[in-house]
Amino acid sequence: MSDLLPNSMSYGGDVTSQAVSQGTEQEIVLYYSRYAWRRRKMPPGPFPLPILGNFLQLQSKGILPSLLKMAEKYGPIYTIHFGSRPTVIVVGYQAVKEVLVDLGDIFLGRGTIPVFEKFYNKSGMNLVNGEPWKQLRQFSLLTLKDFGMGRKTLEEPIQVEAQHLVDYFRSCNGKYVNPSTVLSCASSNIIADLLVGKRYEYTDDKWMKILQDMRDSFEIISSIWGQLYDMYPSIMQYLPGPHQKMFDLLQDLKQIVKDSIKNHQDTLDPACPRDYIDCFLIRMEQEKLDSKTSFHAKHLLSTVFDMFLGGAETTSITLSFGVLYFIKYPEIQDKLHEEIDKVIGRTRDPRVEDRNQMPYMNAIIHEIQRISDVLPMGCIRSAMADVTLRGYNLPKGTDILPVLTTVLHDPSQFETPGEFNVKHFLDENGKFKKNNGFMPFAAGKRSCIGESLVRMEVFLFFTTLLQKFTLKSPVDPKTLDITPTETGLENIPPNYNVIFLPRE
């Protein structure tokens, strides 16, 4: 018996090992059978591995460069797997236009964004779909318009904020400064006025730290760590690394929004709403007995938090890139100074209506927004119904990513897509011309809700600063690096210094 025992144990082990091996093989065969069945009418793409998806192809050069490289092989519409999550990638003006405009009603859904789902607790206007999104979107558009967004009534608060910027940079007395945090504070004050009826001083150390934390958080989100989290959230949430900080860095801002909502609740006068939060609270009270209402505290917190982030962060990045281009190319400033002096002069406050008489400034701003490409990967969408796209059948719920940088750099729309060229928005007579490829805010019914606000802010801030100052680099402009430090969710501008010299 003792001689037989090892043999019987060995025999049993072989059977177990064979059974496990066969089971694993069956799982793999089943996985790829399901994959092949699912993919039979989907756009082409690289073959994914179980769990990893196409990580190996994406990791080598970074996600965005890899997506652009794969488009050369598979065409303007192809399928990639972020982990086990299949996503249809769409590149180039024509294909993106089909998704966002021609089939815009089909691709109105918000796709899977693990980072922001955690930020916003899977709630708020930016993440919800269907009827809740329609209700929140319509309410937000109408309410923000009532408080001046896109209208002349908001011109004065922006003019006032622009003068605060002038006073601050004048107080620097010709010393070089890094303008990024102050520009972020200025842009945050405009959205803060609309949402919570408040303005923050540039000397408010607590608020300035919150804005810097916000920038630091978005740098991590745009890095490979944030991109890995979006591909493998169930794994990355347990692993140590810089990605763990991107959530903590925004907690102080979220707490400010919570405290502001509580203060609004305590001081609310339904007959005299002061801002967006008041109007939302009034609507909540009106519909508190409706079990299907989209107006409740969870959506209020996430929506205000999201608009704060979007209104402060993306606008400030545009402003930072703009100032960087002004000092990189001094000849641009010379032409802008000439146009400002001719149309406005040096004493009157710039007005939004001046933009119609300032084609060069208008074109420069458009080119800054195009070349800075603040949100290069765009924002993921989802099909709200089964749909055929260029012969491919996409089932309801398919995630689809229109890559906006491929529109803003499409050679069919822009003569020199990789270079700063104001002629992209100027005709042969020096008049401003529109360009269909200009989509920094996306397009269609789910485009950026704050587009009109950003356009107004950027024009008034840039025009006021250049009316009062000549911007100079403390180093040779030719040596200035304008390459983003991170390219992912956002293009993050490099740190730089600038000297604001009064023109008086």
Image: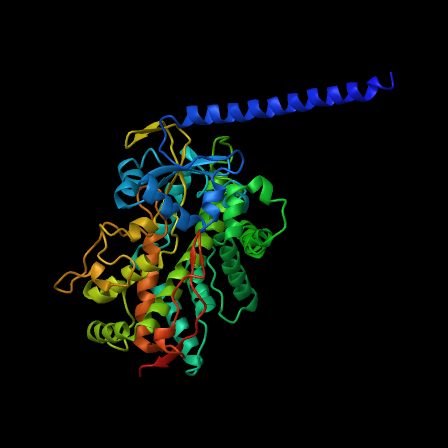
Residue 292 can be seen, yes or no: yes
- Image quadrant holding the C terminus, namely bottom left
In the displayed structure, 92 sits above or below 38; it is below
Is 185 drawn above or below residue 299 in the view shown?
Answer: below
Going 35% across and 33% down the picture, which residue do you hit? Answer: 43
Image coords of residue 334 (percent x, y): 25, 76
The quadrant holding residue 320 is bottom left
- Tell me, yes or no, if residue 270 can be seen here: no
**Residue at x-position 37% and y-position 64%:** 321
- The residue depicted at 49 percent of the width and 60 percent of the height is 215
| Quarter of the view holding residue 444 | top left
Furthest toward the top, the residue is: 1
- Give the percent coordinates (x, y) of residue 162: 37, 69
Residue extending furthest toward the left: 429
Residue 384 position within the rendered picture, expressed as x and y whole percent measured from the top left: 38, 31
Q: Which residue is depicted at the point 30% across and 59% down?
A: 418
Indicate the quadrant where residue 190 lies: bottom left
The image position of residue 107, as x and y in percent, is: 35, 36
